[in-house]
Image (cartoon, rainbow, N blue to C red):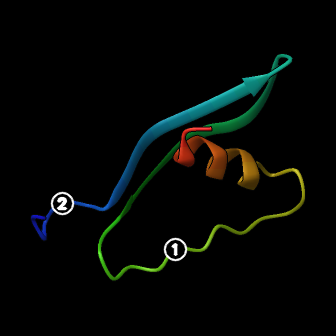
Amino acid sequence: MDASQPLLEARELNATANGQRLVSAVSLSVAAGDRLAIIGPNGAGKTTLLRMLCGT
């Protein structure tokens, strides 16, 4: 794998349900050796974002 290529990359992710915005314009890039924490209050969209990144 090319060291300059991210292991995980997402651009401008958006999710809505029942007309309510759940995730808005999230972009990220994670390289080998990086650590990523997703934090926020209840209902902020953390689980929705992780599901989107996993493709479920």
State the separation of the CA atoms marked 1 and 2. Answer: 16 Å
Q: Residues within 10 Å of mark 1 (few under 14, many from 20)?
A: few
Task: Pinpoint residue 5: horizontal percent, then vertical percent.
Answer: 18, 60
- Of all residues, the one furthest to the left in this rendering is 2
Position of residue 20 relative to residue 31, above or below, is above
Q: Residue at x 26, y 61 (%)?
A: 6
Which residue is at 74% across, 52% downward? 47
Residue designated by label 2: 5
Q: Quadrant of residue 33?
A: bottom left
Q: Tell me if 35 is positioned left or right of 40 in this view.
A: left
- Cβ–Cβ below 8 Å for labels 1 and 2? no
Left or right placement of residue 9 versus residue 3 in this view = right
Question: Residue 32: which quarter of the image?
Answer: bottom left
Provide the secondary structure element on which disc 2 rests: loop
Mark 1 / mark 2, whichever is N-terminal: 2
- Residue 56 lies, in percent from the top left, at 62, 38
The residue lying at 47 percent from left, 80 percent from top is 35
Report the residue marked by disc 1: 36
On the rendered structure, is 42 left or right of 45?
right
